[in-house]
Amino acid sequence: MSVPSRMNGIEITAFGGPEVLKPAQVPVPVPGPGEVLVKVAAAGVNRPDCLQRAGLYPLPPDASPLPGLEIAGEVVAVGEGATRWQIGDRVVALTHGGAYAEYCRAHASHCLPWPVGLSASEAAGLPETCFTVQHNLFGRARLAPGETVLIHGGSSGIGACAIQLAVAYGARVITTVGNEEKRAFCAGLGAQVTINYRTQDWLDEVQSATQKRGVDVVLDMVAGPYVEKNLRALAPDGRYAMIAFLQGAKAEVNFGHVLGKRLTITGSTLRPQSVAQKAAIARSVEEQIWPLIAGGAYRTPVFKVFPLKEAAAAHALMEASEHMGKIVLVP
């Protein structure tokens, strides 16, 4: 396949709202050692993309300035040492930026086989969510079969992924959502308890659902005022995995909960981690999640697909929090 020198992409023309995302002609990247170049069939939209656009997510020095962290597509060029993949292979990849474009570089060790039977949009919605959930829910928070997990934002891409994986792993899932439609959506994914935080006190509901014992694990992307309540919601020896700060990175908390209940607080974000660390997560995802996809126990719920040139509309939808599942761009 002939690879052009320039391509259509989406640039962040200034920090600000969705309107700062503009289509542009940009150079096609060249894969370096250990990398592949992928012709993008679809790209997932994620909250970190919105933060980058707003100027709230500083880029690592070696990252693409174009937004976008996950793709599905076809390998069209292979860098030195990228021995697993050949030209023509269909892959999904966690990218170091640059997914909002017709072509995107990715490290070969951060690519996985495009699962058989999944559309481009479904496949593109896998990497960022699966890497994040696998690493935080099962790696850092050590969720075990038979335990109970509280997943905030259950109808988001991350939430939908976490619910399905926790259920497949034999855990009981409690989740919070913002309306009744989202409650039904999460119940359809397997959540046993769904709480509408707009009409119910979610901490009271968690205590009721667990006979006041609390949950073993919390997966939290909200933070802010949720932090104190999450500590109160945890059972003795509970684990709190923090992955985002939608309501702020600062909170006033009583750390007596941590000492009294022997709690563990942990957190991570993918982008700053090393190539080797992400490669290790990729191996874990392929070993643990890809068989679930093949067996039909996991799916990517795609809420809406936008043309690449309408990336601004995709960001506006995400920031309105009206979606259930993944938002995807197609070139």
Image (cartoon, rainbow, N blue to C red):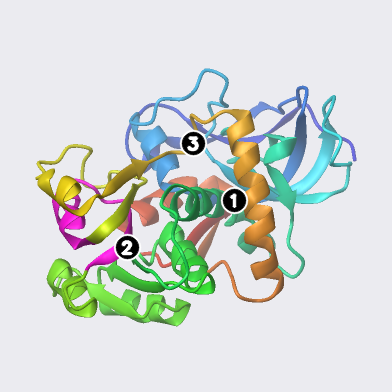
Residue placed under numbered mark 3 in the picture: 22
User: Is residue 228 magenta-colored?
Assistant: yes
Residue 331: tell me if it is visible. Answer: no
Which mark lies nearer to you, 2 or 3? 2
| Depth check, front residue: 181 or 151 | 151
Q: Residue at x 76, y 22 (%)?
A: 32
Residue 48: tell me if it is visible. Answer: yes
Crowding at dot 3, Cα within 10 Å, few <14 / some 14-19 / many 20+, comes out as some
Q: Residue flagged by tag 1: what amino acid is it? A: Pro
Q: Position of residue 323 (x, y in %)?
A: 39, 64
Q: Quadrant of residue 275?
A: top right
Q: Is residue 201 left or right of residue 235?
A: left
| Depth check, front residue: 55 or 108 | 108
Q: Is residue 315 left or right of residue 119?
A: left
Q: Residue flagged by tag 2: what amino acid is it? A: Asp
Total numbered labels? 3
Q: Residue at x 88, y 47 (%)?
A: 88
What is the span of residues highlighted in magenta in the rendered image? Answer: 214-234
Q: Which mark is residue 216?
A: 2
Question: Is tag 2's residue or tag 1's residue first in the polypeptide sequence?
Answer: 1
Q: Please tell me whether mark 3 sits on a helix, a strand or a loop.
A: strand
Residue placed under numbered mark 1 in the picture: 127
Furthest-top residue in this view? 61
Q: Please tell me whether mark 2 sits on a helix, a strand or a loop.
A: strand
* Disc 2 and disc 1 in contact, CB within 8 angstroms: no
